[in-house]
Amino acid sequence: MQHARTGKREQILDVAGLSVVEKGFAATSIEEIIAEVGITKSGFFYHFSDKNELAKALLQRYIDMEEAIFHDIEARAYELNEDPLHGFLISLKLLAELLEDLPNGHPGCLIASYCYQSRLFSADIRDLNARALMSWRARFQQQLERIAETYPPRIEVDLADVADMLSAIADGGIILSRVLHDKTILPRQVMLYRQFVKALFVGT
Amino acid sequence: MQHARTGKREQILDVAGLSVVEKGFAATSIEEIIAEVGITKSGFFYHFSDKNELAKALLQRYIDMEEAIFHDIEARAYELNEDPLHGFLISLKLLAELLEDLPNGHPGCLIASYCYQSRLFSADIRDLNARALMSWRARFQQQLERIAETYPPRIEVDLADVADMLSAIADGGIILSRVLHDKTILPRQVMLYRQFVKALFVGT
DNA sequence: TGTACATCAGTGAACGCGCGTTCACTGATGTAC
DNA sequence: TGTACATCAGTGAACGCGCGTTCACTGATGTAC
């Protein structure tokens, strides 16, 4: 077994996570998960009280991972750089590189997946999804506002929209990359967004 | 019954289409569809040989509808206007207005929905999905290239990427709008893309 | 115009399978005294 | 150090329900001659 050393709970989340972004949550059966993990059905229900709890744990883990990745990227980007614009541009470059280096492209955004199956989930899961998106908006908007203090925008825009645009580009880019089987699309879109931000604050 | 005058086949597609973007294809049961349409299960199988045929018909209809909408928008945008840039900018404005006027926001993009459930579908459906995205890329890229002949780009970009960006913004914007329950996000993203295109070809 | 036949748009009953969930139980490890 | 008990990480068998699919059949409408 490949994950012999990791806990069964973590293995369940790994297997389920992959399946959910490729088949959807409803089509991801517990039966199939336990077969791949090598556990009985009762073993599954020891870790999760029901399937809804699996959905919640899956989403929470995904959000935490993304949060950690962005935190790390920003720490590196602003490390030797106090200029907010250059820091943000470096962040975007680092993000694009990270996405480029994923061997099979981005596996799929769980927030987008859940969005297209929202009637399956309880209100707390939908809330979790919405709060994740709002926290990204706040995070990017804050950085954009710091930039705008030094570099007055050359185009009249709502910085919340510019912040949302990164989330949109990311989710949309993942979809394009997957459907067209071209993993370069997503990082290229991030770099294009970067050029837009540059044009926005320093002109063409 | 609200669709008393339309054919049962069309009603099946209407009901199924809405359910698929809210619960996913696997969780959209034939049982539930026929209950809402007011038909027996055998009636369903008269119209579709199996569930996969429903998926295919659903996607084909969605693609045809989107195609018709874009065709209509472009016809109106370029009607009194031979300048390619202004024509494209008007297209985007018309698109944003159309999206703004949808009473409940965009119901959901079937291409994105299928992308996150692709393992459920046969190869011909996945192909259909990919070809739809490629035709949009081609359509937008062609217009961008016509623009570039008259307005040399102020930023060095790949126009195929700029074309893809519109698809990405649209798919991503739909997701943001739905998850955050704010239908204004999608049209605002389209308008922001419009500002990017403007900056790209005429500067800031 | 009448009759024979074909097609259309379904009905009704039955099928087997896989699903999520429950329940009583267990063997290995950890902790208290 | 030994014993009693608790907790952890599961097992095994059974459940009822809903799913997609099949099959023989039907009543209304259309077409040929």
Image (cartoon, coloured by chain):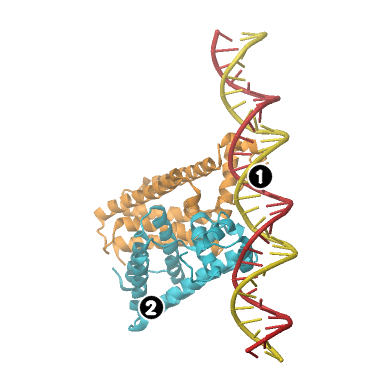
Chain colours: A orange, B cyan, C red, D yellow
Which residue has dot 1 on it? A36
The crowd level at tag 2 (other Cα within 10 Å; few <14, some 14-19, many 20+) is some
Q: Which chain carries label 2?
A: B
Say what amino acid the circle numbered 1 marks: Glu
Of residues A94 and B73, the one nearer the viewer is B73
Q: Residue at x 36, y 59 (%)?
A: B183
Which residue has dot 2 on it? B147
Say what amino acid the circle numbered 2 marks: Ile
Residue A177 visible? The answer is no
Of residues B76 and B83, the one nearer the viewer is B76
Q: Residue B11: percent from the left, percent from the top?
A: 52, 66
For the residues marked 1 and 2, what is the alpha-carbon distance in whole angstroms?
A: 53 Å
Q: What secondary structure is marked by label 1?
A: helix
Where residue C21 sits, quadrant-wise, is top right
State left or right for residue B188 relative to residue B172: left
The crowd level at tag 1 (other Cα within 10 Å; few <14, some 14-19, many 20+) is few
